[in-house]
Amino acid sequence: MAMLPKRHHLMLAGPLLFMVGMQFRMVESFTLNERSTRFVAAQMGSGAPVQNAAWQNAPIRKVIAPPRWLGLALMSVGGVLTFQGVSGRGTAAS
C-alpha cells in the first residue's frame, strides 16, 4: 500500500520548490566556502584540492554554475504541486 502525499505536504513542497527555482533563475553561480569545497572534493573522489604554489595561504573556493533550465524546471514542479495541494485532487484524505 503506497502512501499518498497529503494536502499539507504538497502545500509545503510546492512553494518551497518554486522559491528554490526562482533563486536558481536569479543567481548565475554559487561560490562555496573552503570547508564546503573540501567536502565536495572528497565526495567526488578528486581528493583534496590542489593549491597553486604562489598562493599557498589563499583559500580554494569552488564555483558551481547550475544549468539555466534547472530554475524553470523547479518552478514548474513547484507550481504543479501547489495547484494539486490547493485543489485537493489526487491526495489522500486529510
Image (tube, helix red, strand yellow):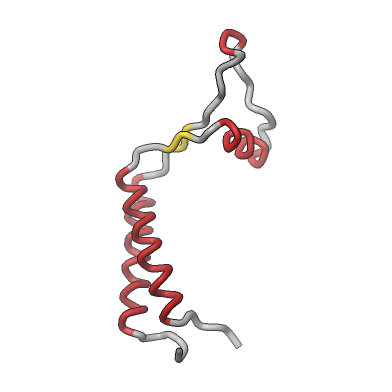
Which residue is painted at 56% across and 24% down in the image?
60
The residue depicted at 66 percent of the width and 42 percent of the height is 43
Q: Position of residue 2 (x, y in %)?
A: 58, 84
Left or right side of 27 for 92: right
| Residue with the most extreme bottom position | 93
| 33 relative to 83, above or below | above
Camera-side residue of 82 and 1: 82
Residue 63: percent from left, percent from top: 47, 32
Which of the 4 image quarters holds residue 48? top right
- In-front residue for pair 93/72: 93
Q: Is residue 51 above or below residue 62?
A: above
Q: Residue 61, image x and y in percent?
A: 52, 28
Residue 15, above or below 1: above
Q: Quadrant of the N terminus?
A: bottom right
Above-or-below relation of 80 to 69? below
Image point (52%, 31%), residue name: 62
- The reply, left or right, for residue 41 in relation to residue 70 is right
| Position of residue 78 measured from the top left corner of the image (x, y, whole percent) | 36, 65
Residue 67, picture quadrant: top left
Q: Nearer the viewer, residue 78 or 36?
A: 36
Quarter holding the C terminus is bottom left
Question: Residue furthest toward the top?
Answer: 54
Number of numbered labels in the structure image: 0
Q: Residue at x 38, y 58 (%)?
A: 74
- Is residue 5 found left or right of 14 in the rendered image? right
